[in-house]
Amino acid sequence: MNDLRVYIYPARTGANGTREVFYSRRADGPFYRWLYEEEAGRWHFTRVHLSRLTLKVLSLANRESVPNELQRQLFEHYLE
């Protein structure tokens, strides 16, 4: 998908060593925070306003670090 970027906090991982929170942005659009909810078994998103400080801490995620289910949901989200 063109102009889609996925971000992470480099130092944060979940209890089992996986990432539990991702951020996404397409082109110059809004940022979304993606959080995996165990009980629902699904990724949920919220639109967020990030401060300049937060933006400096985020790093681009490589494709391999983004779970397949989240990649699918990102694709669906940005198609709408």
Image (spheres, rainbow, N blue to C red):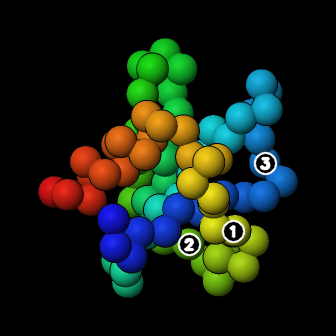
Single out the residue that lies furthest toward the top: 39
* Left or right: 14 as drawn, with respect to 46: right
Q: Earlier in the sequence, mark 1 or mark 3?
A: 3
* Left or right: 76 as drawn, with respect to 62: left
Single out the residue that lies furthest toward the front: 64
* Left or right: 39 as drawn, with respect to 76: right
* Left or right: 2 as drawn, with respect to 34: left
Residue sitting nearer the eye, 78 or 30: 78
User: How far is the residue under mark 1 from the one under mark 3?
Assistant: 11 Å
- Say which amino acid is labelled 1: Leu
Which disc number belongs to residue 50? 2
Q: Earlier in the sequence, mark 1 or mark 2?
A: 2
Q: Is residue 30 visible?
A: no
Identify the residue position indicated by label 3 in the image.
12
- Say which amino acid is labelled 2: Leu
Q: Is residue 28 visible?
A: yes
Q: Residue 39: horizontal and vertical position, in percent?
A: 49, 16
Single out the residue that lies furthest toward the left: 80
Q: How busy is the neighbourhood of tag 2: few (under 14 within 10 Å), some, or many (20 plus)?
A: few
Going 42% across and 19% down the picture, which residue do you hit? 40
Residue sitting nearer the eye, 72 or 15: 72
Q: Earlier in the sequence, mark 2 or mark 3?
A: 3
Identify the residue position indicated by label 1 in the image.
58
Asked if the residue at tag 2 contacts the one at tag 1, i.e. Cβ–Cβ closer than 8 Å, the answer is: yes
Q: Residue 69: horizontal and vertical position, in percent?
A: 43, 34
